[in-house]
Every structure is written in structure tokens, then in C-alpha cells.
Amino acid sequence: MKEEIIEAYALENAISHSGKADQKAVLNSLFAEGLQKQDIKKTIPKIQEAIKKINSLSLQEQTKRYEKLANKVKKREKRIGLPELPNIKKKVIMRFAPYPSGPLHIGNTRQLILNDEYAKKYKGQLLFVMDDTIGSDNKPLNPEAYDLIEEGLEWLDVKTSGKTIYKSDRLQIYYDYAEEMIKKGYMYVCSCTQSEFQELRKLGKDCSCRHLPPSEHLERWEQMFTAKPGDFVVRLKTSMQDPNPAFRDRPMLRISDKKHPRVGKKYKIWPLLEFSWAIDDHLLGTTHIIRGIELVMETRVEKFIWDIFKWEHPTTLHTGFFTIEGIKLSKSKGTQEVESGQYIGWNDPRLWSLQALRDRGIKPEAIREFCLNMGLTRSNSVIAVDVLYAINKRLLEKAPRYFFVQDPVKIHINTAPKIKAKIPFHPSEDLGHREYNTSQDFYIPQTDFELMQNKNYRLMHLMNFKSEEVLTTKPRDFRFISQEPNKELAPKMIQWLPAEANNIKVKIRMPDATIVEGLAEPELIKLEKGDQLQFERFGFVRVYSVDKKKKEMVCWFSHR
């Protein structure tokens, strides 16, 4: 990583935090620029050297240096772009096919973004297919998921072609192909119990059902429409001696009595994933399939069926697993926790759903860049969540800044003059300012108050003052020193609010769904739901609701 890039991000961080850069924050920004984990050790000394130099400069000097360097650095060529798709012989047709058990979360968004980007790259089409076959007891369909998934696509600005295709509308198509394959002897209707067949598969022995004539299997097929779950299952004839036991005579269609959210109990024979997709990828004209590496076996089965019909094979590309450090992603598990009341709703920040990320203030552009940075690779990867936050922070760099005082404590600064404070909304952008009249009474955060010792402190953008002793109980009086900024005189910066001001009550929902409460400056009452801002020395937040009459606001925390 070039020194000028490191310095630029260190300057950016210092300017955002009253002249003091933080090593971890700079490192997170560099992750977003492509810094690899194996390069961290040799990069940290460069970061430390840059921070030492930058923190010795005044805020004004830092800003001037950043203006010169930022223009240069921001013009650099970024490590972006996807590899070319192989086997392009005609118009590219991709497909994204979520299973509606819950909203999309950041994990399955990767496939969506890759499909969308490739469709745009080649001026092709992206089909949106709701893969709503019947599901299982462990992974049931959820009626609300249909709208939640479409809402996620719209928020991410994904452009699909035509109307949504529902698998649940295509059952008769699957039945027709199933009957044809049974008639020609490529599939058979098995009456073995699951445990019986598992034992045969393990031993590599044929099931007795397999050798019945097609006419008898067609009779069994007709019986399936009135039979009970478990009585029959339609199997694909592969080879019961295949080296991979999982490939041996896999089930293609099964019976279910479950009620479907869209079609009720109209159908009771439902296809499994690889059968329905073997048919649909041909009929829908899919040219390229991007799917997770966990579906390699399903791909093999689909190719087996395509060869039966002598259909052209779409090109299938598999991506490796990716996990975010410290975060568990599961649509089905999240659904259970929402329905049980353990989570506050589909947008609970612990879900990492697109709805939760939206309400937290994570930009859709940040999610897109985050997914594209992983590229199209079969390698498994573990990614620090700070990479996403660093990208989002860059997109929010022009967000206005405000004061928020968590768990406020009232203090009195003796002999402090009356000041008409003029506070900028941003340290480097021309976003204007707000003005407050102050006297001698202020609110400061409880945590800052408890840590105070016999030292000098500074209320940001306002004045320097001194605490005469450790103050944990009354009296809470302090002594005014001066107004002029002086890091040597008062290195510790403290958030504040005038005690006389018409402050706003604020609740902030954190990523673990806990609530932080405090007061914020009156200017916030002008904001609307969806506005994004930074609370100085606290972090970025997104406005979730504003009650202008009660002067109350709820925000969701984004990140530092």
C-alpha cells in the first residue's frame, strides 16, 4: 500500500476526530481499498509513522495537507472490475432465484449483486425467479418474505427483466417433464422408506422399485396425487454404484401436504431444486448460472438431466463461502426468532437483513462495492465487518456532524463568559454552521464526567476548563480557563450541550438491538426520517423517526 494512500486516510480520520487519527480506523479504511490480511504486519509501521506526523499538525494544517493529497489519491485506479464471463455465444441471460423463507441478508446478496453486474456488463437480462417450491419443516416458506425480498431488490437498485417468475406457478410444467422421463425410463417412482433407501445407497445396491417396468411407474405416478407424504418419491436413475453416494438415484419430486402461501393445497407433488432448475434453465434460456459452491452436486444432477434431453448446457460458475467475522447469517433461523418475538422484526439489526442494514444507514452502494470486492472466486473467505463499515464511512464523509450527549450530567463552569458559539456542521466541507448561546451550565456525557481528574479539558469548539479534583458527586463546579483551541493546554475533547437549550431526547438502537439514550442539540428537530448524520465522537447514525411535537427522535447506529 502506497504511503500517500495511507497518509490520505490518516488525515481524513484525524480531521474527522478533532485532529487525532486512530490506527484501527485507518487500517479499516485500507481494508476497503484492498489491503490483504497478509500485508497487515508490514503496513502497520507505515500507519503509525503517518499518524505520528499527522497528529503533530494543527487541524488547519491537516486540512490543507488533505486537500492537496486527497485530490491526488482519489484519482488513483481502484482494484475493481469482474473477470470476463466464459462461453459467451449469444445474449447473456442470468437469473437470481431466492427461496422466500425470509428477507435477503448480506450473505445471499453476493449472488444477487454478481448476477446484476454481469447482466449490465453484457447488456443482457437478469431473470428474477421466486424459488418457492414447498420447503420443509426446518425451512418453511414465509408469506412475508415475498415482499421483503422484492423490497430488498428495489433498495439495491437491481434491474430485473420482466415480471417475477414464481416456481409455484410452474408445477404443471414439471409434471409434464416428470411424466415423460418416467415413461422413457429415466426416472422411477420409489416406495422404499427413507431409511431403507439410505442403507441401499450406502451399500451401492439397486432398489427393487428401480427395475419395475415404466408402465407400473406411471401407475404409481398417478397414485402419488392422492397418496400420503412418504408413500412415494420420484428418483432419477443415475447409478447406485457411482463413486459419490450422494449422486446415487437422487430424489427429484416428493409428496407434501403443506399449505403453500400462494397456491394453498392445489398441489401436493413438489419438485426438488435440481429437477425444477434443470427444466427451467433450459426453458427460460439461462446462459450463465452463478451459485454457491455448496450446490456443486445439484449442478452435476442438472447436467445429467440436460444430457438426457440433449439440451445445451448453461455455463455454471460457483462461488466460495464467505463469512463475516463474528456474525452468523441464517434466513431460516432469523425467521424463527422474529416469529417467536425474540427479535423486534424483520429489520432487527442482529439479522443483518437488507432491511436492517438500510435502517442502520448502510448505503446500498456500500453493499454493492463490498460484494464486488470479493469478486467471483471459488475460494472461501472470512471478511472483517470493518471492511463494509470503511466503505460506508467513505460514502458518508460529507454527512453533517451534530452533538449527542449520552446519559447527560449537568456541570457548572465558574466565570465562563457568555458565548455565541458558531459550530460548523463539517470540519472540511462547506455545510454551514449552527449557533448557540452559552453561559456557565452544560451537559456532558456521564462516561466523560466519571473519568475526570485534576486536569484541563475542552468543550469542543467552545472553551477550555479545569476540574480541581476527582468529581463523582456534587458539587460539580469547574473553572474556566480560555476559549482558544490549545491541544497542549487541553488535550481531552468533550461533547457538550448548553443546559439551557431546548435539547432533543434521543434514543439510539445499537447493532446488538440495545438502546442508548441521551440528549442532542435542537437543530436535529429539522431532520426527517432517513437522514444520515454523524454524532461527534460517537458514530454515524440514521434517523428512524422524529416526533417534532414531543421533541423526541429515534436513530439507528451505523458504525464508528
Image (spheres, helix red, strand yellow):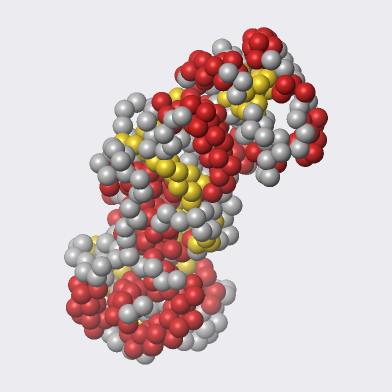
250 on left or right of 370: right
Q: Against 358, is 280 above or below?
A: above
Q: Quadrant of the N terminus?
A: bottom left
Q: Is residue 435 visible?
A: no
Q: What residue lies at 34% left-to-right and 88% top-to-bottom?
A: 53
Q: Nearer the viewer, residue 457 or 149?
A: 149
Q: Against 170, is 28 above or below?
A: below
Q: Against 365, is 560 above or below?
A: below
Residue 327 in which image quadrant = bottom right
Residue 460 in which image quadrant = bottom left
Q: Pinpoint residue 112: horizontal percent, then vertical percent.
A: 41, 43
Q: What residue lies at 62% left-to-right and 28% top-to-bottom?
A: 236
Q: Against 277, is 413 above or below?
A: below
Q: Quadrant of the C terminus?
A: bottom left
Q: Pinpoint residue 357: horizontal percent, then vertical percent.
A: 44, 49
Q: What residue lies at 69% left-to-right and 11% top-to-bottom?
A: 216
Q: Pinpoint residue 324: horizontal percent, then vertical percent.
A: 53, 58
Q: Is residue 298 visible?
A: yes
Q: Nearer the viewer, residue 347 or 364?
A: 364
452 on left or right of 158: right
Q: How many marks?
A: 0
Residue 204 in which image quadrant = top right
Q: What residue lies at 39% left-to-right and 28% top-to-bottom?
A: 284
Q: Nearer the viewer, residue 225 or 267?
A: 225
84 on left or right of 331: left
Q: Pinpoint residue 410: horizontal percent, then vertical percent.
A: 46, 67
